Image (cartoon, rainbow, N blue to C red):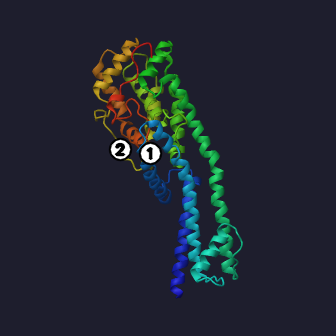
Amino acid sequence: MLILRILSFGLGLYIVFITALSAIRTFLLPRAAPDPIAGVVFRSLRVIFELWARPMRSYAGRDRVLAYFSPVGLLVLLVMWLVLALIGYTFMFWAFEVQIPGLNPWEAAFTVSGSSLFTLGYATVETLPQKILSFTEAAIGPLLIALLIGYMPTIYGAFSKREALVNLLEIRAGSPPAAVVIISRYHRLRQLQDIHEMWIPWEAWFSEIEETHTSLAMLNFLRSPVPEHSWVNAAGAVLDAAALVVSTVDIPWNVQGPLCIRAGYIALRRIADFFNIAYDPDPQPADPISVTRAEFDFACEQLLLEGVPLKPDRDQAWRDYAGWRVNYDAALLALAKLTDAPPAPWTSPELREQRRPPLTGRGS
């Protein structure tokens, strides 16, 4: 019997330990650290939400359902932590033989654990070890709740900062955003020579999402207030615009474009690493990409209709563009699928008819 109680205490202590470690990984550790408990919670909820959203006929309806996924996931994760703490301490209280008249040993241990965790105070203990357990559990419950409440401003602060540029992008790129629209509008406004200034804030944006979307993974699934907006689509449009400018548009070279692309594909890859998304870490310029040559040529024709100066060697421009795109192509498409991003040009390979840039001339 003594061996059973020792094993029970060890099991309970382990459950409490992994629960506390889960909370630390989720909120306190300032680096990417996938957590098994959070993973089980969010993967299970994702299945439920996918089944809920499947009957929706429109993307807007699906978006309304999926908008609840990440907030509900945070609340369910908190409940999971509290349940695990309750179970862990129940095992430990049973090991210390707590007693309540009229209850069997397991019922008594569960009652004392619940009373301590939620600081109800109606079940008392007698010995010093039992009191120590009771006091520690009484501290853990409010601490877990305080962690979630305390980090909500941090989570939504990072979300708001991310969405500020995403919302502003509609002015330049339309909705859904398209690289061709960005370049065309800069040309119409006679600012094409200064388009490199756009890459500077986006380089910083990529650096920020790399940090926030790996240390606070639920941010990846917080959806934009506008259903047609998506941080993944915004990233793709900006990267494609920078790649087209560097490879195809005939304007003076500027280093900001390549720097923005590098910041972008590093950020997308780091986020993909967090979710164990496979991609080639060292792709070759000639490796295949999801954008076809026909789609690239169509984009070039649209730019020519707008009067955008293009480099004369179209074949070399295609090779250069593909050489940039290959660095972020796989991670971009995988993250768009993971987050259920709305259909957008060059980001939704399963919707070929929607991948032509929404531009038909100067009326756009």
Q: CA distance from mark 2 to mark 1?
A: 28 Å
Tell me, for residue 279, which label it has, or none.
2
What number is the disc on residue 100? none
Residue 327: x %, y % from top left: 37, 36
Q: Quadrant of residue 345?
A: top left
- Is 351 above or below relative to 23? above
Q: As rendered, which of 202 and 291 lies closer to the eye?
A: 291
Mark 1 residue element: helix
79 relative to 278, above or below: below
Q: Is residue 45 above or below residue 99?
A: above
Label 1: how many Cα within 10 Å (few below 14, some 14–19, many 20+) = some
> Going from the N terminus, do you reach mark 2 or mark 1 first?
1
Rendered location of residue 42, percent (x, y)? 48, 53
Q: Is residue 167 left or right of residue 131?
A: left
| Residue found at x 64% / y 75% | 112
**To which quarter of the image does residue 339 belong?**
top left
Residue displayed at 54% across by 44% down: 212
Which residue occupies the foreground of this view, 93 or 259?
93
Residue 46 image offset from top left, x and y in percent: 45, 51
Assign a secondary structure to mark 2. loop
Q: Amino acid at mark 2?
A: Tyr
Provide residue 253's location: percent of width, then percent of height: 43, 20
Q: What's the mark number on residue 53?
A: 1
Give 269 or 351, whichever is nearer the viewer.
351
Residue 320 image-quadrant placement: top left
In this picture, residue 358 sits left or right of residue 220 = left
Image: 267 above or below 242: below
Please identify, in this view, whether the residue under mark 2 or under mark 1 is nearer the observer.
1
Q: Amino acid at mark 1?
A: Ala
